[in-house]
Amino acid sequence: MKMDNTEKHTEVGDVLLARGILTEKQLEQARRRQQRLQIPQHRAILDLNFASEEDTYRALAGLHKLEFVDPTTINLKKEVLELVPVKIILHYHVIPVDYDKGILTIACSDPLPFSEQGNLRLLLGKRLRFVLSTPSSVHAVIKKYYGLGAETIEQLRSDQVFKSLSNEMLIDLSNSETASTVEASVKNFVDQVLIEALRLDATDIHFEPFVKSIRLRYRIDGILQEIPVPNELKNVYDAVVSRIKIMAGLNIAEHRVPQDGRIAMKSTTEEYALRVSIIPTKWGESVCLRILGRQSLFLDLGQLGMDQDQQATMEKLTQLPQGMILLTGPTGSGKTTTLYAALAHANDVGRKIITIENPVEYQLDGVSQIQTNEEIGLTFSSGLRAVLRHDPDVILIGEIRDFETAEIAIRAAQTGHLVFSTLHTNDSISAVTRLIEMHIEPFLVGSSLICSIAQRLARRICRHCITQDYNIPSQVIDEMTESLNIPKKDIKAFIGKGCIECNHNGYRGRVALYEFFLMNEEIVDILEPGVKSSRIREVAKKYGWKPLRHHGWHKVHSGLISIEEQQRITYRIMDFPLVKKIN
């Protein structure tokens, strides 16, 4: 690989500036941060998110006359990995990537001082060649081949806690010193799992025990991804569960019934909470941790993914004096985030806003928030009655589940309150028929419901590796042409090739798809018990209503989501070609 010609530059920022990646203003800001915090300049640039990790480390490699290598793209051989002890790999954060003609190539996550290079040569007893990689890629390779928390297992091994017995690895907890070592190591392992989840922007953490192994999975951008862990984790898993129970204030002696709890956490940059759910299974207790309260919660309508018309409509809805606005969609589709963004836009000193939720997932300044507690009789319906006596202007109901809650919400929307809530339906129009099925009088639905909004979350194509997709199926081209009303030759779609920034998935982050349905007089006139969604849909189309799939094609064409993601989010089984109509 040819190294970059950076001899005339002395700093990483100079190289990135010459390549047009940084501006003069950004470089000055990075230098100020570098001096203030006494950190390397490349770290200051990455902290400010002025350049990608790969671009920054390629520049750094050129300055140090090192080759840049991405070990995640190399099929590493087991015999090469075994040339370096695990303890050295974890301590120095390096990866052996090649061994040829007596020279071992070592990928480092940062340039090593000459003294450290000399130490490694002595420890390994080999001729070494050093190359540079990004910390993320080295971390990913260590996690892939040794598992998350390998440091913990290695520490337990070095302290001789593991004892071999009948080809199985067991822990001797008979003495207090051993128990103390296990406790400290398990604490470190749980911390590593949480830190890694935050780094990857995961929303959920799943521990799942099986007969011979423990599976760890993170939900990232709505999709569960397996995270490798050391095989020996099975032997300390009970201690891991006990550690989580202690953090959540649960009963560590109870293993037969489900338990729920909450953990307040704080990292160096933000505060967050973990909602803990533990259930007993055949091979042990399964643990699910939901990460709440991250600072990444959007409170600006402009960041949610609405198009201009949808955003303008939403802004007008939040300023209405009364009426009901419903968000529909499955669990995990971002309804809460949208509702909170709407409340933030509606929040001003002249309005009283009260929410009743289960649970209160995010805290909003200036908003009175109530959490339901069915054990003491504080349900959505009973809480809502109390809220109405508290002189609110805007009310948020976490979810309409039953007739009683729906009826009180409808009455509130008719008596001078702006009501926001959620409902579990497949699309925006089904919200109308769902309320009628809950035995709400059609004329009450028509007079109180202003708008219902269907929502889904789609994975966003990584901005760093986006490229045009030239393999668009003909049926997709036909559908996009009809939906977008543009010539076939102008149809475009994009994919993510996969890079260091997106962990080679091709996706990074998520964007919401919205489908707005606005009530009008003609629709009100056709509402009656047993009215079909298809009838309402016919009328709504005359007034510009478009299905979620239509809005998805716009995001495909603009490069926000891929065709694959659009199909995953909006594909209907009735569109499947093997399903044929029976004459």
Image (cartoon, rainbow, N blue to C red):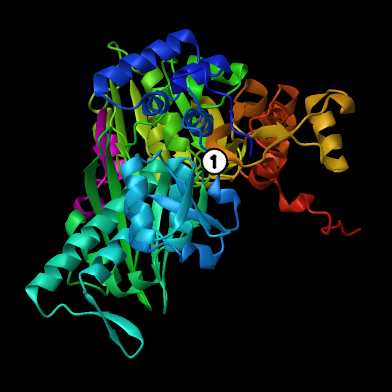
The spot of residue 412 in percent (x, y) is 37, 28
| Location of residue 174 with respect to 562 vertically, above or below | below
- Residues 442 and 341: in front is 341
Determine the residue located farthest toward the bottom in the rendered image: 166
The residue that appears at 34% across and 36% down in the rendered structure is 294
The spot of residue 228 in percent (x, y) is 45, 61
Q: Which residues are magenta?
A: 368-385
The residue that appears at 53% across and 29% down in the rendered structure is 55
Quarter occupied by the C terminus: bottom right
- Residues 569 and 243: in front is 243
The spot of residue 168 in percent (x, y) is 34, 84
Quarter occupied by the N terminus: top right
- Residues 15 and 452: in front is 15
Disc 1 element: loop
- Residues 328 and 520: in front is 328
Determine the residue located farthest toward the left in the rendered image: 176
Q: Is residue 427 left or right of residue 357?
A: right
Q: Is residue 307 highlighted in magenta? A: no
Q: Is residue 192 visible?
A: yes
| Location of residue 181 with respect to 12 vertically, above or below | below
Residue identified by numbered label 1: 500
Rendering quarter of residue 348 = top left
Count of number-bearing discs: 1
Q: Amino acid at mark 1?
A: Ile
